[in-house]
Amino acid sequence: MSISREIAPQLPYLRRFARALSGAQASGDAYVVATLEAVVADPSIFPRDLPARQALYKVFLSLWSSMASGGRAVPAGDLKSAVERNLEALTPRPRQAFLLRTVEGFSMEETAGILGVTPQEASDLIDKAGREIAEQVATSVLIIEDEPIIALDIEALVEDLGHAVTGIARTHKEAIELLDEQRPGLVLADIQLADGSSGLDAVNEILTKINIPAIFITAYPERLLTGDKPEPAFLITKPFRPETVKAAISQALFFDQRAGAAVG
């Protein structure tokens, strides 16, 4: 199959990535066009040892690095979405890693291959992006988890990203009590709690009072796959990897229109 046939289905996704990276569709499209022209002029720059989508992004970022020197176009006008403001806060290399992993859905290994780094280096870049996001959208987090060791691990991950923990609830009742004491900007919840109550029910009740993103960390993911509210936009299965939790927290806040709002 020719290169053009291989990359054609990937162009809408590359345009999305380019727009997010540059900050404007026009400038993003300009880089996409430049990438296609470069591949046509010299097909050897298209790495055949990678799947087509990974190879296309790798060529794009190689060209981006040589032309942009870390700069990016900023959308015209004063009105910008929370996503655009948050994106501008990220330095170039962590921004690339973060978008590849959380927006484009590449695995850590695929992200590393595109960037030409090791998986650990890619993880470190995403972790740095999470800390940079936290500097702009630092918030408070309510943890609903009945296993003390896991709760402490999650608390450490949250604080490592620069966020504060409002409290750790072991039951539905405790979660609502903590909510009444201090309103968080994010909730991390298990489903099966200590007294047999449901973290899902607790989150449902919380969302009737405040509109915040929720991340479920559970050994029972099938209990969220019911089509009922809240939608499991962020679902992590136990046992979890620390970098997965950190990426989910950063992603949830990055795309939250209320990111950066005062809580308390």
Image: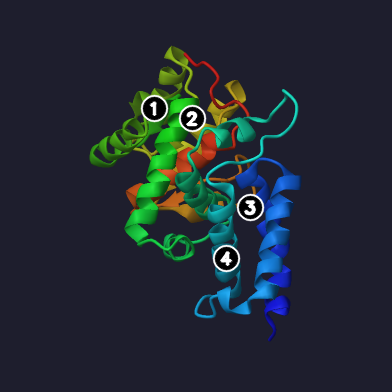
Q: Which mark is residue 243?
A: none
Q: Nearer the viewer, mark 2 or mark 3?
A: 3
Please provide percent x and percent y for residue 21: 60, 46
Specify whether residue 195 is in view: yes
Kind of residue sitting beneath label 1:
His
Q: Quick one: SS at disc 2?
A: strand
Kind of residue sitting beneath label 3:
Phe
Kind of residue sitting beneath label 4:
Val
In this rendering, position of residue 3 left or right of residue 106 = right
Colour scheme of this structure image? rainbow
- Residue occupying image coordinates x 45% and y 45%: 94
Q: Give residue 15's quadrant in the image.
A: bottom right
Q: Which mark is residue 59?
A: 4
Kind of residue sitting beneath label 2:
Leu
Q: Quick one: SS at disc 1?
A: loop
Residue under numbered circle 1: 163
Q: Mark 2 and mark 1: span between their CA atoms?
A: 10 Å
Q: Which mark is residue 186?
A: 2
